Amino acid sequence: MIKRILAIAVSVLALSVTAFAQTSTRWGVTLGGNYNQIHFKQSDIVKVDRGFGPVVGLNGEMNIPGLGFAIDASILYSMYSSKIHFGDWKVWNSAGLNTKTVMMHNIDIPLNLKLKYSKLNGFENTLKPMIYFGPTFSINVAGTNSSDHLKYNGMNTMLHFGVGMELFNRFQVSGEYSFAIGESMRTRVLDENVAKNRCWSLVLTYYFKD
């Protein structure tokens, strides 16, 4: 089911390329944060607390006039953080590993299909609601030095869904939920148990051009 949703999202984004000649393009900067949890496949293997991380990068958006649709792409630096209580289990405690804050430094490339509601009798120039979804291609470039206990996945795909608003045709504020389809990391012991990121994010994008 997840693979089907991902295929539909990518197909819709690809088909939208044919409408580029009628689009208006603008660029902006994005700043925000996420609240992430490293979720192990065996949820009782170890206790994990969520952690905060920054999100910052560049965004490009193409609006399709008259349809209320837009597509966008970003390149973002995202830090995914969680606190893992390794010391609760003897297999790690005996190796001298206790509670550890794990941080993954990723380059994220999210693609979005947006639906903006703009039939508000002129009020849309002040506030315009929107919803969006799409895939995120996430590349891990660094992680907390736990090489004896953890193995990071170099590239992963996530799905995200979000809601937000556009203010004064210049700012976009959005909140989203994203989850990894493939593994984000795995342990090197206990049968190499797989873990995936599950993340809530809140971001602000400022566009230089209307």
Image (cartoon, rainbow, N blue to C red):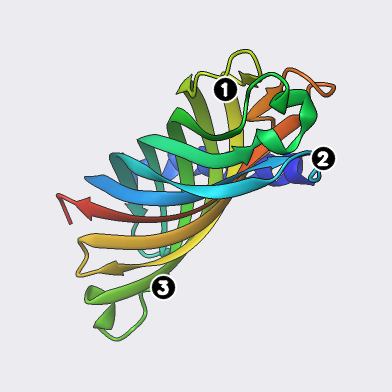
| Residue 42 circle label | 2
Cα–Cα span, label 2 and label 3: 41 Å
Residue drawn at (33%, 73%), measured in percent from left and top?
128
Horizontal side of 28 relative to 179 (left or right) equals left
Relative to 82, is 120 above or below? below
- Indicate the amino acid at tag 2: Gln
Label 3: which residue?
117
Viewer-side label of 2, 1: 2
Residue drawn at (63%, 30%), measured in percent from left and top?
184
- Indicate the amino acid at tag 1: Met
Label 1: which residue?
155
Cα–Cα span, label 2 and label 1: 22 Å
Cα–Cα span, label 1 and label 3: 34 Å
Horizontal side of 119 relative to 125 (left or right) equals right
- Indicate the amino acid at tag 3: Tyr
- Quadrant placement of the C terminus: bottom left
Horizontal side of 1 relative to 165 (left or right) equals right
Residue drawn at (33%, 60%), measured in percent from left and top?
65
C-beta proximity under 8 Å, tags 1 and 3: no
Q: Tell me the quarter of the picture where residue 201 sits.
A: bottom left
| Residue 176 circle label | none
Q: Position of residue 5 (x, y in %)?
A: 70, 47
Res 25 visible? no
Q: Quick one: SS at disc 2?
A: loop
Q: Position of residue 11 (x, y in %)?
A: 61, 40
